[in-house]
């Protein structure tokens, strides 16, 4: 029986590893739904890294298993192993290949970051200019800005986002609306101006594949285009205190018609609340009457409210 050459086995193994890695790297379902223009860019980079990781895993673990079987100690064999001291070509190979992979991934990641708008704010990429931005609280020079095809264009919607322990407040400066949820129209170029009033928070929407820190005293920016209507979680991804895990809200992506409707309804509701606040003189109310509408938000029980009435 003719022995199969090692080179042929290596070729077959290489083809199998490549096929399995590519298939698993693009059919893993590990990531949530894509809901922004930036999401496919991040997912493409993730898929490449995952494909490489699977290939390396199969090669390393497969080699270990083959060696465990082929070079296992046989019963009655008490001889020493072969005195192998080193293999320079092999050492160069397994050093050069990871180096090429890391350099390639680095170049790819820079291109993805640029396409997402990571270089658009500009000043944070130059160490000399960092100090100049620390005192700017409104410029939004740090973060993810406009993508290359929209640079120089004003965003369709600007929202001021304020993080605090343990909530997010969304202010729409052009309409005077404040909300505890982020509402945006699908397909619109949205710019978030992020800030924090106490500690560092991090604004993260997994479905958008975007995350940006909100820093006390330093303005940051996050610009995106939502591509799929729906409701998606907003998570604080920076440990900000004892109730960090509960600092959650949601971003609601509307159709343009639904967003215009929400905007109009919110403006009417805000005006009604303002009129009610102006019409009522808090000095004429007792403590219990003044607190009654806010009992639920303050976490007060009916017993506590009754005690205030005495």
Image: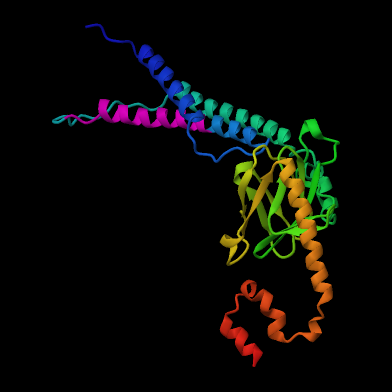
Q: How many marks?
A: 0
Magenta range = 50-74
Magenta-drawn stretch contains 292: no
Q: Position of residue 28 (x, y in %)?
A: 48, 33
Residue at 76% of width from left, 56% of height from top?
266
**In the image, is residue 242 above or below residue 134?**
below
Looking at the figure, which quarter contains the N terminus? top left
**In the image, is residue 272 above or below residue 1?**
below
291 with respect to 232 (left or right):
right
Q: Main secondary structure of the magenta part?
A: helix
Q: How is the image coloured?
A: rainbow
- Quarter of the image for residue 151 reads top right
Q: Position of residue 305 (x, y in %)?
A: 62, 84
Residue at 46% of width from left, 31% of height from top?
54
* Camera-nearest residue between 26 and 53: 26
Looking at the figure, which quarter contains the C terminus? bottom right
- Quarter of the image for residue 85 reads top left
* Camera-nearest residue between 234 and 144: 234
123 with respect to 91 (left or right):
right
Magenta-drawn stretch contains 58: yes
Residue at the top extreme, as displayed = 2
- Quarter of the image for residue 168 reads bottom right
Q: Position of residue 162 (x, y in %)?
A: 74, 59
**Is residue 209 something one can see in this rendering?**
no
**In the image, is residue 150 above or below residue 128?**
above
Q: Position of residue 145 (x, y in %)?
A: 77, 41
**Is residue 178 something one can see in this rendering?**
yes
Residue at 63% of width from left, 37% of height from top?
39
**In the image, is residue 178 above or below residue 251?**
below
Residue at the bottom extreme, as displayed = 310
């Amino acid at each position: 029986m003719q022995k199969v050459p090692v080179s042929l086995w290596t070729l077959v193994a290489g083809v199998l590893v490549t096929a399995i890695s590519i298939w698993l790297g693009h059919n893993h379902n590990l990531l949530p739904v894509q809901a922004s223009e930036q999401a496919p860019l991040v997912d493409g980079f993730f898929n490449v890294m995952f494909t490489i990781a699977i290939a390396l895993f199969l090669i390393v673990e497969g080699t270990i298993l083959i060696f465990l079987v082929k070079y296992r100690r046989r019963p009655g064999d008490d001889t020493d192993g072969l005195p192998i001291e080193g293999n320079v070509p092999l050492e160069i190979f397994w050093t050069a290949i990871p180096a090429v992979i890391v350099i390639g991934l680095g170049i790819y990641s820079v291109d993805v970051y640029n396409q997402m708008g990571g270089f658009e704010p500009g000043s944070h990429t130059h160490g000399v200019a960092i100090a100049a931005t620390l005192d700017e609280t409104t410029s939004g020079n740090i973060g993810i800005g406009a993508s290359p095809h929209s640079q120089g264009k004003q965003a369709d919607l600007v929202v001021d986002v304020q993080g605090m322990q343990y909530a997010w407040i969304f202010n729409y400066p052009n309409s005077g609306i404040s909300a505890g949820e982020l509402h945006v129209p699908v397909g619109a170029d949205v710019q978030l101006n992020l800030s924090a009033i106490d500690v560092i928070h991090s604004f993260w929407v997994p479905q958008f594949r975007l995350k940006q820190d909100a820093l006390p005293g330093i303005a940051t920016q996050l610009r995106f285009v939502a591509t799929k209507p729906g409701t998606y979680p907003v998570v604080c991804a920076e440990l900000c205190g004892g109730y960090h895990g509960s600092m959650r809200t949601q971003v609601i992506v509307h159709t343009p018609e639904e967003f215009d409707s929400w905007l109009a309804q919110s403006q009417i509701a805000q005006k009604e609340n303002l009129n009610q606040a102006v019409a009522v003189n808090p000095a004429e109310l007792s403590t219990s009457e003044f607190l009654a509408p806010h009992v639920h938000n303050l976490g007060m029980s009916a017993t506590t409210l009754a005690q205030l009435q005495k």
